[in-house]
Amino acid sequence: MSRNWVFLFVLLPSLLSGCAAYRSYNRGETCDRSIREYSRLVRWSEMEKAVIAMVDQGQRDAYARTAESMRRRDVTMVDARILAQECHAKQGRAEATMEFDYFVMPDNRLKTVTDHQQWVYREGSSDDQVPGWKLITPPPRFR
């Protein structure tokens, strides 16, 4: 009987630390996926979807205004590149730098905007029901 208790006390901490490591790994994987998905949505002019899914509650109005302005001014996205990203899953924060190439009709000059982003992991709350990585920096200016 005592051998079972010793085994339990040795196994339980290992099991719990394994669960914590898996959770951290999962956060890191979803961080990378969120940043890539945001880039894809903006690239294909689906910023409204990105606002709903990936933008923190405090920045949603600013992103919604930017999305409306882009649609009204006929901003056409040409390319999106992730230049750098760094996910700190354990701390629940991440940083990314992206470039977006676009033009505004009738002007056909290609323009580029660099977007320095900060992301945080939200567990889910009354304000933001869906847990996940949320963008907390203001949107880039597509002039």
Image: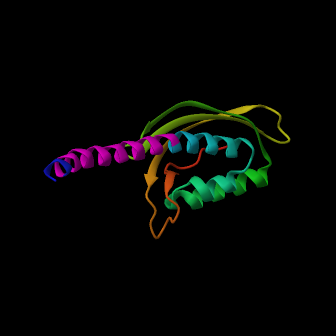
The reply to whether the magenta stretch includes residue 65 is: no
User: What is the total number of numbered labels drawn onto the structure image?
Assistant: 0
Residue 69, percent from left and from top: 71, 54
Q: Is residue 91 visible?
A: no
Residue 7, percent from left and from top: 21, 46
In the picture as drawn, the residue positioned furthest to the front comes out as 1
Which residue is found at the position 26% from the left and 45% from the top? 11
Q: Is residue 98 above or below residue 132?
A: above
Q: Nearer the viewer, residue 83 or 9?
A: 9
Does the magenta stretch mainly form a helix, a strand or a loop? helix
In the picture as drawn, the residue positioned furthest to the right comes out as 106
* In-image side of 132 versus 52 (left or right): left
In the picture as drawn, the residue positioned furthest to the bottom comes out as 126
Q: Quadrant of the C terminus?
A: top right
The reply to whether the magenta stretch includes residue 16 is: yes
Q: Is residue 116 above or below residue 51?
A: above
Which residue is found at the position 41% from the left and 47% from the top? 23
Q: Is residue 43 above or below residue 61?
A: above
* Residue 61 location, quadrant: bottom right
* In-image side of 101 versus 134 (left or right): right
Residue 82, percent from left and from top: 59, 32
Q: Nearer the viewer, residue 123 or 7?
A: 7
The magenta region covers 5-29
Which residue is found at the position 71% from the left and 41% from the top? 43
Which residue is found at the position 63% from the left and 44% from the top? 37
